[in-house]
Amino acid sequence: MIIDQKKIDEAIDTIVAYGGEYIRECVQCGACSAVCPGVRAGFPLLCRNLIRHLLNGQLEEIIEDSSSWGCQACSRCTEVCPQGVRPQEVVFAFRRYQANQLAFSTSSVTSQMNLFETGHAVYVDPKEARKKVGLPETTPTSAFDEQAKQEIQTLINNSPMGQLGLF
Amino acid sequence: MAKVGVYVCHCGSNIAGVIDVEAVRAFAETLPEVVIARKDLFMCSDSGQEMVKKDIRDGLVDRVVVAACTPRTHEPIFRAAVEKAGLNKYLFEMANIRDQGSWVHSHDHEGATEKAKKVVASAVGKARNLEPLEDTFVPVTDAALVIGGGIAGINASLALANMGHKTYLVEKQPSIGGVMAQLDKTFPSNDCSACILTPMMVEVNSHPNIEILAYSEVEDVSGYIGNFQVKVRQKQAYVDWSRCTGCGDCTQKCPSKTPDGFNCNMSNRRAAYIMFPQAVPKKAVVDIEHCLNCAGREIGTLPTINEKTGRPILAPCERACTAEAINRSIAFNPQGAIKEIEVGAIIVATGFQVMEKDWFKEMAPASPNVVTALQMERIISATGPTEGKLLRPSDGEKPHTITFVSCMGSRDEHFHNYCSRVCCMYMIKQARLIKEKYPEIAINMHFIDVRAGGKGYNEYYINARELGINFFRGKVGGMEMLPGEKLRVLAYDGDTASNIEYESDLVVLATAIELPKDANVLAQKLGLQFCGSNFFRELHPKLGPVETAIEGVFLAGCCQGPKDIPNTVSQAKAAAAAASAPLSQGKVRIEAVISEIHPEVCSGCGICIPLCPYHAINMTTYADRPRAQIEMSACKGCGVCTSACPSGAIVLHGYEEAQIFAQIEALTA
């Protein structure tokens, strides 16, 4: 790995611009990774390791890595971080960078499509299960509310997500 | 018949966790002349001591044995208790069943208990034969010597002088100030080093109780606490300091150039020089080794006379000196002069040196752009060779990338196993000073780990990260010299487990702090010992951090071990307080456990004299014959002379023959 200050600056400036503004505070203690369900599930570039690669200026080198999409947004990393780095913000900032470069993980595309079509990122058809226990088949959410769905799609189409050409 | 009382201590679970205390107590009861054997959870507690005192007051016992921990820390406590109860304090004996029992035999409870019984029996054997002894007192010279004029010596001197003691401050360089005078700014508050140091140097110089002996070294020390005789060699300056005004004119005119040690040899000074602009005392010195003897003006010769003018032809330095402080016609003694002083206490504050870069062959020491951190201090200092401009040595260009490498010679079994304690912080300091001034310079710092323990230190480190200084966990493995005086840095990032490589313009090595070689010479003169890290050994690592094994000799600063300025100042003030104790008392107690020669038995062979590590024995005349005699205030009671005397003429009080044979008998029973 070549250490190049220009690349370090580019990586840090990018992450800061996308909302990971405390990345420089990291001392690599690893507390974030210790509590991260994504790390536990085996995603290699989350929390501490993601931050280290970024601090080394390895922004482009890891753009195709799908680990960041394994973040469950539980925020435990931010809760335990002793330096106030707010690691989850760094992960999300990196995701935003990836998305803007159209470096989506395939695993995340389904969620995006679900969100656009139903208003839920994670969606399972509930009708069968509800019928079994004697509940009305549809739920009072956007999934079965055409007006709400249209509003969500209008919002997404007018957000940066809409410019990604996914939908 | 003696009435021996034995008191066995549990020391909480320290002893009782391994040794069967009740068994030892019961055994002690069976020993001859033992009248009472008791036990307590903590014998050193008030209640434990009271138990002993009560038995003495009640007339039950007249010899006391406490079986507990080490006499090194606890003998004085029990002696005091015994004395308070009205018994001579030397009628007390300690049996160490903790350090030499439960601690070293923690896995063998039965064996440890049996050993404890033997140790107690031995102590009882000795106690039965103990004789009362009396301490004596000797008067004290109310003056102190401080050796070394760095920040430690300066603070120790000021503290002593402010307490009213006459203080001699000996400094081998022409000016006091030490390494701190070479530093640019100081962590963690970035105070300018000179700004906080110079006022103290001036205060030392003007203090009525302090006499600075600059450009001087301790030649010889004799005597003992309260009464040291010290010979100080005042080196030959070839300048009459009583006339020198420190104007510096001679240093301008002198044509000879030689590397300037104050600038870590990165620039030249003249042979006639003043150490640095804020020098105290501000006096010029002619470095005769590098003097060119201009105009044939060898020292001690008369000048040739100019035939035209009829005036003597003088050397430039002489001509420049309007104060008439330089007169090369004088036959100066190259050895300088000896000044004899008498002091009651001595503080050693001789400081440290940093390792040179040449030790580290893998770090391209041949490159002028690889510098030690002390050289870096001079590079960024306003009084340094570049007047504070950050320029790399090879070509005077501004560097774009700077590398800092930690632990060069520290935490490395090839050199020193210890941590030099200040490197992490001064590296961060230098990096911050550079980054604050030149944000465009890339700074890469390589650490085994960052050690920022100290008030405000970690905050200082975190701020360095915020400034955009790059930190890597992993030491630099090597360096390659590249064309254009650049260096290829070969390092490692432990966090991502990957190798790192880049080109650097300037590399700073944080080389280790170590004791200078000439410290050995001083150690011999004073009888100082060394610790495992090869610094001067303090009396006790926790409880005697400024005292030494030599009574009346104290330590301050980095000569005792690496430390930063706040710790150095603390230790210097502590050493001054400790040194002031005998001076303020006006007398010192001489413990009675010392050797005495019976002149009627002594054959005058003199074997004991060179053996005494304290130079306490000399020859005298007794009944018209030469006989050895011990200066009791210098004797430490080590017993070397006693065991070596072929005539058996020397008795070590407190360890007399009958007492030791009784111990042997008990141990071999």
Image: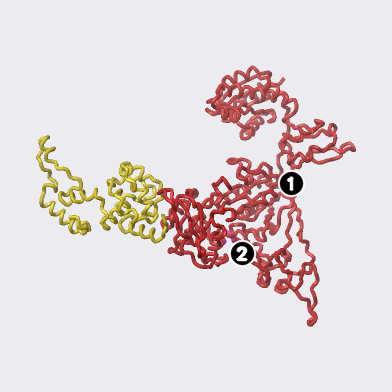
Chain colours: A yellow, B red
Q: What residue is shown with label 2?
A: B278
Position of B394 with respect to B243 (left or right) is left
Which residue shows up at 71% across the image and 42% down it?
B588
Can you say whether B539 is above or below A153 in the image?
above
Res. B195 in view:
no
Which residue shows up at 59% across the image and 55% down it?
B358
Can you say whether B65 is above or below B424 in the image?
above
Task: Measure the C-alpha gap from mark 2 to mark 1.
Answer: 35 Å
Can you say whether B537 is above or below B650 in the image?
below
Q: Position of residue A75 (x, y in %)?
A: 30, 46
Can you say whether B227 is above or below B50 in the image?
below
Q: Position of residue A49 (x, y in %)?
A: 37, 48
Tell me the quadrant of the picture where the C terminus of chain B can be found: top right
- Give the quadrant of residue B150: bottom right
Query: Does the stretch in magenta take in B474?
Result: no
**Relative depth, front residue between B358 and B239:** B358
Position of B31 with respect to A151 (left or right) is right
- Give the quadrant of residue B600: top right
Q: What residue is shown with label 1?
A: B227
